[in-house]
Image (cartoon, rainbow, N blue to C red):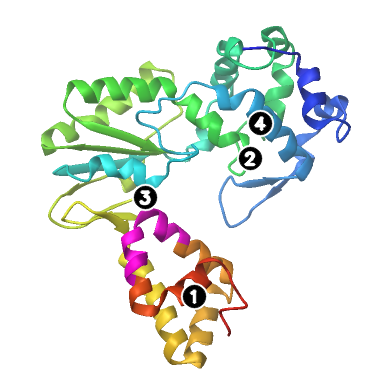
Amino acid sequence: MTQTSLQNAFVSYFHTRYQFDDFLSILTNEHYTEIFYSKNTFSPSKKLKDFQKFLNLFLFELLPLNQDVVFSYRKGVNAQDAISPHKNSKYVLNTDIKSFFANINTSKLKKLILDNKNNFLILPSDIEKHIDTIMNIVTYNSILPVGAPTSPAISNGYLFDLDSALQSYCLRNEIIYTRYSDDFIFSSETKESLTKVLPIINDMFIHLGFETFTLNESKTRIQQRGSKIALLGLIITPQGYVTVDKNLKKEVEILLHFYLTDKEKFRDYFLKKFSSNIDKVSGLLSHINAVDSYYIAKLKKRYGSFIVNSFTHRDIHNVTF
């Protein structure tokens, strides 16, 4: 692996679009807009976002990642991949971390970056020299902001030691473990083995240096095969099939039914449920297709491939309102 100076990497990435001095001196507090409907979520300016994408490429995408158990913020995998390993288990436990991004310790994050300085595309000496600038670019008011392009990759690397420790424990105790962002999923053939997991996680928080983390008790539950199991907005059916929630299916079917039978009701429903935004319908159909392509095939058989494809591909010329 060839390493280069931070400045050379910056110039090769941006050419003349930005000056390296801007990167070193940017006042990040002036480059965030708070998204009021979502706690601790901030939208970075285009300039700051570009700087963060640059750091992702040369640093944070190279942080260690336990690909056996982590299915968030990775190309080619999604929530379904995090759920599928559990589809045949008798019991499933899911829990998450309270205010995950906001409770990532910035001192521990700084140490993580420095500990991995030899794994990046930037010279280790430059990582040490510019560590405060790097921290300035990726944090806001001493937290890792939701909404920054760097936060997902950083969060996966930040949890590497915890993922590996939990994986080892689960392998020894015949438990399946996967993680999607701050959602932990465990499954087993015995309920007793899962009831022991929560105190183990809390012990690991302490012994591995994650003292700022606490589990969200209100979102912790054990579900049993025999009825539908809800995880990450998806469903494991009693037959062990992963699909989307029936309410999402119902929304799509009502929309397509009204489109074919009653244009006035279609317009009213389209406005009410989707704000007359074809992108929302397309996004929902694409999401369903990624999880359950068999169901999309059923929709095409019932309502016609032409109609379903027109909505999926935002083909306004074909879908006449």
Q: Is residue 233 visible?
A: no
On the rendered structure, is 225 left or right of 209?
A: left
On the rendered structure, is 248 left or right of 172?
A: right
The residue at which mark 2 appears reads as: 148
Main SS, magenta residues: helix
Q: Indicate which label's residue lies in the foreground, 4 or 3.
A: 3
Instruction: Give the mark, 4 or 3, whose residue is nearer the N terminus.
Output: 4
Element type where label 1 sits in the image: helix
Q: Quadrant of the N terminus?
A: top right
* Residue depicted at 32% across the width and 48% down the height: 218
Instruction: Give the mark, 2 or 4, whose residue is nearer the N terminus.
Output: 4
The residue at which mark 1 appears reads as: 273
- Image position, residue 159 (x, y; %): 44, 26
- Image position, residue 32 (x, y; %): 72, 44
The residue at which mark 3 appears reads as: 232
Residues at badges 2 and 4 in contact (C-beta under 8 Å)? Answer: yes
Element type where label 4 sits in the image: helix
Residues at badges 4 and 3 in contact (C-beta under 8 Å)? Answer: no
Q: Which residues are magenta?
A: 286-298
Q: Amino acid at mark 2?
A: Ala
Instruction: Give the mark, 3 or 1, whose residue is nearer the N terminus.
Output: 3
The residue at which mark 4 appears reads as: 138
- Tell me: residue 49, above or below residue 307: above
Q: Is residue 149 visible?
A: yes
Q: Amino acid at mark 4?
A: Val
Q: Is residue 71 magenta?
A: no
